[in-house]
Every structure is written in C-alpha cells, then in structure tokens.
Image: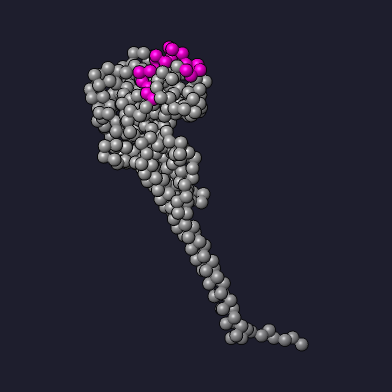
C-alpha cells in the first residue's frame, strides 16, 4: 500500500526561508568584511607612509640643528657617523638616517663659462669625463651625449650665440632660442645661471634619466672650486684624465684618516705626479669656500621608507641655517 508524500508544512517552509536569509546575510557580511579589511589595509599603508614622511622630515630638522650648532660638523668625529648615514635615529614609531655632504664637493655647472665670456676648458673637460664615466657605469642604458655640455652653457649664459666646442669632434654644438622656439610648446632659452639642477631638464639633449645619473655629481652653488675632502669618487676621477681609480682610492683612504689641510699635501699621496697636481690645483680646494650642504634624510616605519632631500645654507653672520631647496623623493 502506497503512502502519499506529505507536502512541507508551514514550519518547513519557514525553515527554508530562514536558511536562505542566513546564507544571503553571510555573503553580505563576508563581502563587507573583505571591503573593510581592504580599506583598513589602505588606511594603514597611508598612515605608515605619513609616519615615514614625518620621520624623514624630522631627520632634516636634526640636520638643520647639527649644522646650526657646529662650525664644522663634517670634520667632527662625534658627528661623522651621523653625517654619513650610519646611525639610525629613533623617531616616534620609526627611525631616520641622515647623510650630509658639502655642495662644493661637486662640479658646478654654472662655472663652465667664465664671467668674462670665455669657456673654462678645464671644467668643461671635467664634465666631459664625467659623462664618459657615467656611460661606462651604465651598461645597456641610455647613452649621454657630449652635446648636453655646450647646450647647458648656452642655457645658462647671457648671450644668444650658439656655443661650439672645437675640441669635441661630434655633438659639439649648443642651442639658443632658434632651437627652443621650434619645440611644442615653444620655450625661451633660460640665459641665466641655473638655480637648481632641475633647471637643466629642458636643455637640448637632456632627459630625466641622464639628469638622474648626473645629479649626484653636480651642483649650482659655490665658486666652482671642488673640495678634495668632500668630492665623491666619481667627481675625483673626472678631475683629470690621469686620475686613475688607484690614485682616487689613495686620496679617499688618506682623507678618511686625516682630511687634507692644504693642497700641497696631495703631493704626498702615492701615485700623484707633478703633472696631475699642476693640472688640477686651480680647480680644487681643501677648505669650505662656501656654506652649502646637501642633506638626504630617510625615514623608515616598519618596512616602508621615504626620503627627502634638501640644500641648506649656513649663514654664519645671521646665525641661521636656511633651507633653500627641498624635494620629496618617495620610497
């Protein structure tokens, strides 16, 4: 005898509806949880980034204080590790590290032409060697052409004559308004000294990559003389074609033990010949001919870092340290 199947009663139907509602609500809650978690991660990342920026800015303030309270902080043994970025300074929930270098340890692009209008052959040759050294270091990257040197000269000098470098075989011509006016949009040639290295970006032949590679060896401050105690390895190598890597290494080693107090002490460095010494002596110094410093401050929170760069001027008469350039480089 067959039994007839019983239809679900009201209670069974309600149970099915409740189960369906629970499933739908669970899906909504899971979606809300994922959205909330994603937003929380974004907010946390933004918060950490702001903390890292604040640590970097705090490091810059520390550098300002150090330069304001010490007549020669880069020669003070107590501050040498700090200025070299070797010390991690606790700042709130993170740390900062600071690097301080003298601006007159770099090649001054505003010194490629003398005030009387003559080209400075020695400094131009140094810039050309810097380009050679940079191209050798960057294998497979963009090649920097010699043409940017006469183009920079025309960009910063006050005349409208196109510069020619007769001692360069190729890429030896600069550019004035007759070139920049053909661009889209057209530009006016600057025709005055550069205030910052970034001012060189519009120069004919210059690219962001080329400027980025040369930036760490160039400056727009000072009287053009390069401090042998502050110049980085690449700048020392470009001083003269006979500045071999071995000789540069000996100079770096000697100044680490004891900074040069006079140019004559260079003659005692193994490998330094009288020809090399005479060739570079007019463009170098052992002292601070200016009071400009470049500061890199890197702030770190957990695994996130941010960096700021600034150029500071130490005004001894007013007793102040002024920030004359500032830029945020990011991570």
Judge whether residue 208 can be spotted in this image. Answer: no
Position of the C terminus by quadrant? top left
Q: Which of the 4 quarters of the picture holds residue 106?
A: top left
Q: Quadrant of the N terminus?
A: bottom right
Colour scheme employed for the rendering of this structure:
one colour
Q: Which residues are magenta?
A: 268-286
Residue 171 lies, with reference to residue 67, above or below; the image says above
Q: Kindly identify the residue that appears in the image at 41 percent across and 18 percent down.
A: 264
Query: Along the horizontal axis of the image, is 294 left or right of 116?
Result: right
Q: Nearer the viewer, residue 162 or 136?
A: 136
Q: Between residues 267 and 5, which one lies in front from this camera angle?
A: 267
**Residue beneath the point at 55% across and 70% down:** 26
Considering only vertical position in the picture, is 177 above or below 296?
A: above
Residue at x-position 52% and y-position 20%: 246
Q: Quadrant of residue 148?
A: top left
- Residue 280 in the magenta stretch? The answer is yes
In the picture as drawn, the residue positioned furthest to the right comes out as: 1
Q: State the image coordinates of residue 273 (x, y, percent, origin top left).
A: 46, 13
The location of residue 73, given as percent across then percent down, is: 40, 37
Residue 71 falls within the magenta-colored stretch:
no
Going by the picture, which residue comes out furthest to the top?
A: 275
């Amino acid at each position: 005898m067959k039994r007839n199947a019983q239809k679900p009663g009201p209670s069974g139907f309600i149970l099915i509806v409740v189960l369906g509602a629970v499933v739908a609500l669970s899906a909504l809650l899971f979606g809300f949880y994922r959205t909330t978690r994603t937003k929380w991660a974004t907010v946390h990342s933004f918060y950490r980034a702001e903390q890292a920026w604040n640590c970097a800015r705090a490091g810059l303030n520390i550098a300002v204080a150090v330069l304001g309270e010490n007549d020669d902080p880069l020669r003070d043994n107590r501050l040498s590790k700090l200025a070299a970025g070797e010390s991690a300074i606790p700042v709130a929930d993170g740390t900062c590290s600071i690097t301080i270098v003298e601006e007159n340890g770099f090649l001054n692009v505003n010194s490629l032409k003398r005030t009387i209008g003559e080209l400075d052959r020695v400094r131009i040759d140094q810039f050309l060697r810097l380009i050679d050294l940079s191209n050798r270091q960057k294998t497979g990257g963009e090649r920097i052409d010699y043409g940017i040197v006469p183009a920079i000269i025309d960009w910063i000098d006050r005349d409208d004559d196109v510069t020619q470098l007769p001692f360069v075989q190729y890429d030896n011509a600069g550019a004035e308004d007759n070139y920049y006016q053909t661009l889209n949009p057209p530009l006016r040639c600057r025709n005055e000294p550069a205030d910052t290295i970034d001012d060189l970006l519009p120069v004919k032949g210059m690219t962001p990559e080329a400027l980025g590679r040369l930036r760490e060896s160039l400056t727009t401050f000072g009287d053009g003389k390069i401090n042998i105690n502050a110049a980085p390895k690449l700048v020392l190598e470009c001083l003269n074609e006979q500045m071999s890597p071995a000789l540069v290494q000996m100079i770096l080693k000697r100044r680490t033990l004891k900074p040069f107090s006079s140019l004559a002490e260079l003659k005692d460095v193994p490998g330094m010949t009288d020809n090399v010494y005479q060739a570079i002596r007019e463009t170098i110094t052992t002292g601070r001919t200016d009071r400009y410093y470049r500061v890199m401050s890197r702030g770190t929170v957990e695994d996130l870092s941010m960096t700021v760069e600034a150029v500071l001027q130490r005004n001894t008469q007013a007793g102040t340290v002024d920030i004359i350039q500032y830029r945020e480089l990011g991570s």
